[in-house]
């Protein structure tokens, strides 16, 4: 098995096109064609994690946080990142990172947090907007089925839990072939009328090139007429954070105790108790303070995330309980997520969870 096989499986679950603009995901160190002797899964890539990979004979590290995040001007032993990269290269170890793209899928980082809390009736807290496009293409009626299937296979036509979604209208197309053409139907210089089907389907924008290529390869016409529209629709199965319900409401003290135990948090920074039951829970793995307004507008009783700044706690306004459990604590189960993805596909391959606690924050 090669590095690219592992990468493809994770990116099938969380396409890199879902990443935030500032992020750096994918294969960061190594070659996609290198053979994999074993996979070590960690939240971060530190020297200690690399040493563990060497001991365990793992030639690929799969991490949540990118080792290379902003532009590197040099790679020397004077920096932590430099020492790690040098050791990786000397030992033939590749590094793959799945970060905000894994945050953005329904069953991703926040979904795993919701699993641990047993939330039901889940929806995305802040759904993606402006990432859906509609492709409209005109196809001769006898070839509509094959063109449609080619686009479905390339990733188009998925709406929620439904796939192969399209809208089709029959009509007539007209064209006149010029002298330098090789028309599939009709004759050069003569107006031709052809029974055609207008096919409409939606897709995330990162599938656009693949779907267009598949459509053009399957389409019989020499010149293909098609349109692309960007949609303003929310994409309800993709975005940041999650909101859901507790099956059995709890008081605030019991709920925070449950959260502290579940996430093994050294402490929880929180706003004042509001003396009400906790039923609707909003959460976001990592730094989710920007989603407080979403949690408020959707009627959450509590918002669990990390990295709230002092003044941001005031924004709760006695309307919601904020629970800051820590960045590492909120994302730690992402390792389990990667493990499940890879062991389901590669059941007889060595995939290991790192035993190194990479949390840089300690509690006194």
Image: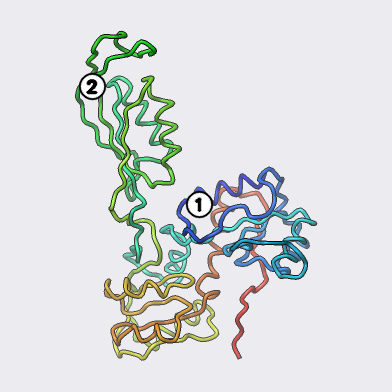
Instruction: Identify which residue is drawn at 33% across, 83% down.
Output: 316
Task: Please provide percent x and percent y for residue 26.
Answer: 58, 53
Q: Is residue 151 left or right of residue 167?
A: right
Where 356 falls versus 150 (above or below)?
below
Q: The residue tagged with tag 2: helix, strand or loop?
A: strand
Residue 164 in percent (x, y) is at 34, 38
Estimate the x, y position of residue 167 in percent, counting from the top left. Answer: 25, 36
Circle 1 SS class: helix
Residue at 49% across / 77% down in the picture? Answer: 262
- Mark 1 — residue? 16
Q: Is residue 76 left or right of residue 211?
A: right
Horizontal side, residue 268 vs residue 158: left or right: right
Front one among 327 and 67: 67
Query: Which mark, by number, is residue 173?
Result: 2
Reply above or below: 25 against 316.
above
Q: Quadrant of residue 1?
A: top right
Label 2 environment density (alpha carbons within 10 Å; few <14, some 14–19, many ≥20): some
Q: Position of residue 232 (x, y in %)?
A: 28, 53
- Asked whether 172 or 225 is in front, the reply is 225
Q: As rendered, which of 193 and 337 lies closer to the eye?
A: 193
Q: Are marks 1 and 2 in contact (CB under 8 Å)?
A: no
Q: Vertically, is 152 above or below 106?
A: above
Sequence-earlier tag: 1 or 2: 1
Badge 1 density bin: few <14, some 14–19, many ≥20, Cα 10 Å: many
């Amino acid at each position: 098995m090669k590095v690219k096989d592992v990468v493809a499986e994770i990116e099938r679950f969380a396409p890199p096109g879902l990443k935030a603009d500032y992020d750096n995901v994918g294969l960061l160190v190594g070659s996609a064609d290198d053979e994999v002797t074993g996979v070590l899964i960690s939240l971060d890539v530190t020297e200690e994690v690399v040493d563990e990979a060497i001991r365990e004979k793992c030639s690929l590290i799969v991490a949540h946080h990118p080792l290379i995040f902003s532009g590197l001007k040099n790679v020397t032993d004077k920096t932590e990142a430099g020492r790690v990269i040098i050791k990786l290269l000397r030992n033939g170890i590749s590094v793959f990172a799945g970060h905000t793209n894994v945050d953005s899928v329904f069953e991703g980082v926040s979904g795993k947090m919701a699993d641990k809390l047993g939330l039901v009736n889940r929806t995305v807290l802040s759904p993606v907007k402006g990432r859906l496009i509609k492709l409209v293409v005109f196809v001769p009626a006898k070839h509509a089925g094959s063109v449609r299937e080619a686009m479905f296979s390339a990733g188009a036509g998925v709406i929620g839990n439904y796939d192969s979604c399209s809208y089709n209208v029959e009509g007539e197309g007209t064209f006149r072939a010029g002298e330098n053409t090789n028309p599939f139907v009709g004759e050069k210089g003569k107006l031709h009328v052809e029974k055609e089907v207008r096919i409409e389907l939606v897709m995330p924008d990162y599938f656009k090139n693949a779907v267009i290529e598949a459509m053009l390869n399957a389409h019989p016409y020499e010149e293909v007429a098609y349109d692309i529209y960007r949609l303003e629709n929310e994409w309800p199965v993709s975005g940041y954070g999650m909101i859901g319900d507790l099956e059995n409401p709890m008081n605030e003290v019991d709920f925070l105790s449950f959260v502290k135990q579940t996430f093994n948090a050294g402490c929880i920074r929180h706003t004042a108790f509001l003396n009400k039951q906790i039923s609707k829970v909003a959460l976001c793995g990592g730094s989710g303070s920007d989603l407080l307004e979403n949690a408020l507008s959707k009627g959450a009783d509590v918002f669990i995330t990390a990295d709230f700044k002092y003044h941001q706690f005031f924004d709760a306004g006695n309307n919601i309980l904020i629970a800051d459990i820590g960045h590492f604590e909120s994302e730690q189960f992402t390792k389990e997520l990667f493990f499940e993805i890879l062991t389901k596909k590669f059941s007889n391959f060595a995939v290991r969870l790192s035993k190194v606690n990479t949390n840089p924050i300690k509690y006194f």
